[in-house]
Image (cartoon, rainbow, N blue to C red):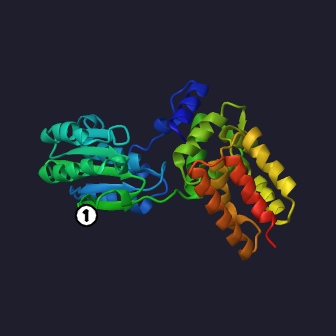
Amino acid sequence: MSEADEQTAATATGREIWIEKYRPQSLDDIHGQEEIVERLQSYIDQDDIPHLLFSGPAGVGKTTAATAIARQVYGEDNWRGNFLELNASDQRGIDVVRDRIKGFARSSFGGDFRIVFLDEADSLTDDAQSALRRTMEQFSDNTRFILSCNYSSKIIDPIQSRCAVFRFSPLSDEAVAAQTREIAAAEGIEVTDAGVDALVYAADGDMRRAINSLQAAATTGDVVDEEAVYAITATARPEEIESMVTNALEGDFSRARATLDTLLTETGMAGGDVIDQLHRSVWEFDLSEREAVALMERIGEADYRIAEGANEQVQLESLLASLSLEE
């Protein structure tokens, strides 16, 4: 969920944002990344932490893992003084590396080393990454760097080779469901099984989105159910997407187009969101392999054209029309 969505959820409830309130404080509390947690814990136990590179999609525990390492290494009272967090998407130039990071790395404060956490490091310019590489070499005796990114391929090879790389995968449905149930119980919220399933579907492996959706849905009534979740997240029900595709494949373009129009105008979905739901639901539909392949091909074409600036509704209607004409 975007920063605006998080602020909306916080404003709606008038309470602390739950993603911070329930952020795991230690590695053992992190859900769904057991193998990574085990390896990171072994570094801490051996007091031998290398530079680290965390890559993976949003909301899967990268930032939480970095702060949990700092808490465990320095303790609750001292970790903030030994931990510098920067967001590279906001401060992506070479001056950030030369000034803030070097200034922090030159000092020592109550420990053998300090930690620099650089979030969204794949937003750094090439010059800034080259400067960062030299800084990592220069201050390796008293500073550890933790880099977080969505795409490790955008990090230059000299930096990757200096880091232990951890690839965070999207969280499993079971991990998301367990965490949302725990938070609902702690907040005294009644959530139905269908409501949890809807939260899991809307989150698509993103724990932050699941928790924000739960907090927002909790304001709509006494019970968080399927209807409340889909309404608050502006997510289409899986059966709506399936019905739209099935109607198109059966040649009923008018009905498929009517469903699409409802999703875009009444539900308020963006064209890109419709594309995303179509893409991750293709193999869940009762389609033949030929139909599934045809749908994937059309989805790819529409996604590319929308990304290039074409009209979303026109492209999605074209996608449905092409499916209706399939023999």
Q: Amino acid at mark 1?
A: Ser
Q: Please state if 323 lies on the left or on the right of 208 as rendered.
A: right
Q: Quadrant of residue 304?
A: bottom right
Q: Quadrant of the N terminus?
A: top right
Q: Quadrant of residue 158?
A: bottom left
Residue 238 appears in the picture as rendered: no
Q: Position of residue 64 (x, y in %)?
A: 40, 46
Viewer-closest of 306 and 141: 306
Q: Quadrant of residue 289?
A: bottom right
Residue 292 appears in the picture as rendered: yes
Q: Secondary structure at mark 1?
A: loop
Q: Is 318 drawn above or below residue 7 in the view shown? A: below
* Residue at figure coordinates x 53%, y 30% from the top left: 7
Q: Position of residue 10 (x, y in %)?
A: 55, 29
* Residue at figure coordinates x 56%, y 35% from the top left: 5
Q: Mark 1 = which residue?
A: 161
